[in-house]
Image (spheres, rainbow, N blue to C red):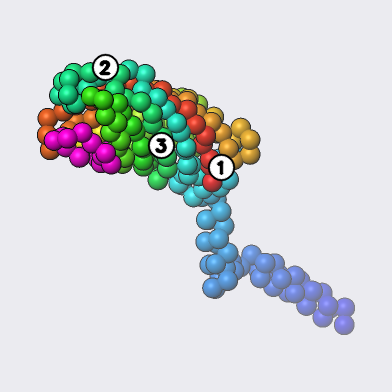
């Protein structure tokens, strides 16, 4: 009997060790492998949660601004006029991120003017590129955008459509109070009339709130 146990026990131990070393295969093993691989690819960004090789979050900015200086050419009764630009109200929404380097945003603005004794007003829609990307949380940013402007009220015989373009620089501070921050921005805001002669060149200063989600 002692000889039998001396033979069976080593065989049992060898079989158990071989089973432990054998790789686990099958559908469940494959699912666990791919789940682990996906988790490894997930990165975490401060204040933005997790992201799978994409932007950590989007943001929506609400802003109010004023033209600091502006000149109109061939617009209104007096040809060239100064300080025709007045107020500006805007919304900027971050659409996405390009290669972890810059943001693509859509900006909609309402602007009013005082030219030749009249008060034109216009809505503008501009795709805007800004860098660095918001995921970096770097406070300073720069950008440029161009798009279409549509006058809601215009002086006589002038185009209702304009080509609007901006160059901008600013500072933004995210999540100052939970998901709400603030920003300040300055730059150039110009317009070219598309269907008639006329042009507006101006500089602006704007500030507002930025919400991340």
Task: Decide which of tag 3 and tag 1 comes sooner along the chain.
Answer: 1
Q: In the orientation shown, which residue stands out farthest toward the left?
A: 196
Residue position marked by numbered label 1 in the rendering:
48
Mark 1 closeness class: few <14, some 14–19, many ≥20 residues within 10 Å:
some
Q: Position of residue 184 (x, y in %)?
A: 47, 25
Residue position marked by numbered label 2 in the rendering:
82
Local SS, label 3:
strand
Q: Is residue 194 visible?
A: no
User: Does the magenta portion include 134?
Assistant: no
Q: Which mark is residue 90?
A: 3
Q: Which mark is residue 130?
A: none
Please give the name of the residue rendered at 47% of the width and 37% of the height, measured from the top-left corner: 62
Q: Position of residue 66 (x, y in %)?
A: 40, 25
Please give the name of the residue rendered at 30% of the width and 35% of the height, measured from the top-left corner: 121
Q: Position of residue 77 (x, y in %)?
A: 17, 24
Local SS, label 2:
strand
Task: Decide which of tag 2 and tag 3 comes sooner along the chain.
Answer: 2
As drawn, is 39 to the left or to the right of 151?
right
Q: Nearer the viewer, residue 211 or 97?
A: 211
Q: Nearer the viewer, mark 3 or mark 1?
A: 3
Q: Nearer the viewer, mark 2 or mark 1?
A: 2
2 and 1 marks in contact (CB < 8 Å):
no
The part of the image, by quadrant, that contains residue 76 is: top left
Question: Alpha carbon of mark 2 to alpha carbon of mark 1: how far?
Answer: 44 Å
Q: Which residues are magenta?
A: 146-161
Local SS, label 1:
loop
Quadrant holding the N terminus: bottom right
Q: Is residue 42 above or below residue 141?
A: below
Question: Alpha carbon of mark 3 to alpha carbon of mark 1: how far?
Answer: 24 Å
């Amino acid at each position: 009997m002692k000889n039998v146990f001396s033979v069976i026990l080593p065989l049992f131990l060898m079989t158990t060790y071989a089973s432990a070393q054998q790789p686990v295969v099958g559908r469940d093993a494959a699912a666990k492998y791919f789940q682990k691989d996906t988790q490894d690819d997930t990165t975490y960004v401060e204040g933005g949660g997790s992201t799978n090789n994409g932007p950590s979050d989007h943001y929506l900015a609400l802003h109010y601004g004023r033209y600091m200086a502006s000149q109109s050419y061939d617009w209104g009764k007096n040809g060239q006029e100064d300080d025709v630009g007045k107020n500006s109200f805007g919304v900027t929404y971050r659409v996405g991120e390009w290669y972890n380097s810059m943001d693509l945003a859509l900006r909609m603005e309402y602007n009013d003017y005082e030219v030749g004794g009249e008060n034109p007003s216009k809505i503008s829609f501009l795709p805007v590129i800004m860098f660095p990307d918001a995921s970096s949380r770097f406070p300073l940013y720069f950008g440029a955008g161009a798009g279409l402007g549509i006058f809601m009220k215009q002086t006589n015989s002038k185009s209702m459509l304009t080509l609007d373009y901006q160059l901008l620089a600013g500072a933004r501070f995210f999540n100052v109070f939970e998901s709400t921050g603030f920003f300040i921005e300055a730059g150039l805001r110009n317009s070219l009339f598309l269907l008639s002669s006329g042009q507006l060149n101006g500089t602006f200063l704007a500030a507002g709130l930025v919400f991340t989600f």
